[in-house]
Image (cartoon, rainbow, N blue to C red):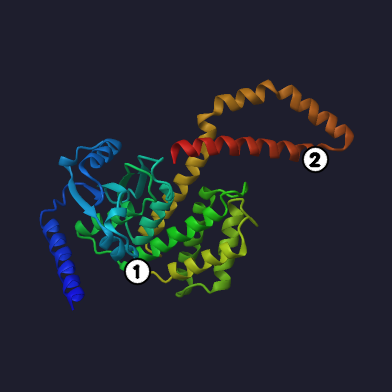
Amino acid sequence: MKKKIFGLVLSFSIILSNVAYAVGFDKDKDDVIYGVALNDQQRKIVDNAVEINSEDFNVGTVNGADLEKYLGYGTSDSNMISSIVVKRLEKGSGIRVMIKTPGNINQITEAQYTNAAITAGLTDAEIFVASPKPVTGESALVGVYKSEELHGTKLDPQRTKTAQKELKTVIEVSKENESNPNFDSKKLDRAVIEVKEKLADYKEKNGQTAPEDKILVFVLNALENVDMKDVLSDENLNSLITYFKSYQDLSGITNPEVRDNLFKLAKDIGGKAGKFYEDNKESIDKFAKDNKENFEKIAKDAKDSGLLDKVINFLKDVVNSIIKVFSKDSDSSNN
């Protein structure tokens, strides 16, 4: 009986605190939502990272109860650390996410935050993520959802929980393949977007969700389109198919705003993938120029000996290996 009474008092307190916060919430301001575990000094670290004066923002927190409400599982308040700033943008701007402390958000990428936010039904916002110490980054995602609701947007709990399921699935697949040189988490993010688009097309055209065998075709085609054919295990594929079965049951996946945001995210991921060449164009071009004669001689000798195709394939492998090494170095400093 005492436990029940305590539970009711706790629930009532949470409701009262949320109501009180919402009443004093200025909808014309942007928001900073801290993990409730942060002390004043840690909040200042977050403020400096995201370059804000919190006095100019609505200030809120997320706790373990919020995590359970939006993501479907609980944790203690002491684990709620990562924090976010949400700035509203004009209609049609899409979702933009920037992790301001990349060394301290060790599980969720910018693209994954964006993908999850789109799945949950968010439309136009700029989101900054920061943490004063290494964490997974899930409380920041909860902060995005709480910020939306305090701005008057009623989020569908099925959508937020499906978004969490997406994150969990993609992260697990990435972890299981982190030692595989042919795996690229950014390519997986792009494949996820493509499958979402295909499922929306199918639902719109047929008036119903796609059967499991069709989802498998979409997944395999999407992986092939990002050069990851035969990279994932059958278990990985089954995990993705299970997730997409729940995704396509969501209302609104054919919504033009959802599709537009997915298109923008795919374009953004592609742009970042090509940024390595742009940032290193001068060095790459110089290397090619300095070694032009050597490459031409190798090609001539190989052609004369009938080994041209083998040499070309070998050189391709070498170049791809070099690019992967540099790309990983670039990723480690930016993500």
Residue at the extreme bottom: 1
Residue located 31% across and 47% down the image? 127
The percent position of residue 177, horizontal first and vertical second, equals 57, 53
Up-down relation of residue 306 to residue 15 (above or below): above
The percent position of residue 133, horizontal first and vertical second, equals 35, 43
Packing grade of label 2 (10 A; few <14, some 14-19, many >=20) is few
Quickly name the residue at label 2.
Answer: 310
Q: Secondary structure at mark 2?
A: helix
* Residue 307 picture quarter: top right
Up-down relation of residue 63 to residue 244 (above or below): above
Up-down relation of residue 271 to residue 137 (above or below): above
Q: Nearer the viewer, residue 151 or 232?
A: 232
* Amino acid found under the numbered disc labelled 2: Lys
Quadrant (top left, top right, bottom left, bottom right) of the N terminus: bottom left
Q: Nearer the viewer, residue 256 or 296?
A: 296
Left or right of residue 130: residue 213: right
* Amino acid found under the numbered disc labelled 1: Gln
Quickly name the residue at label 1.
Answer: 158
CA gap, disc 2 and disc 1: 53 Å
Left or right of residue 192: residue 304: right
The percent position of residue 71, horizontal first and vertical second, equals 34, 63
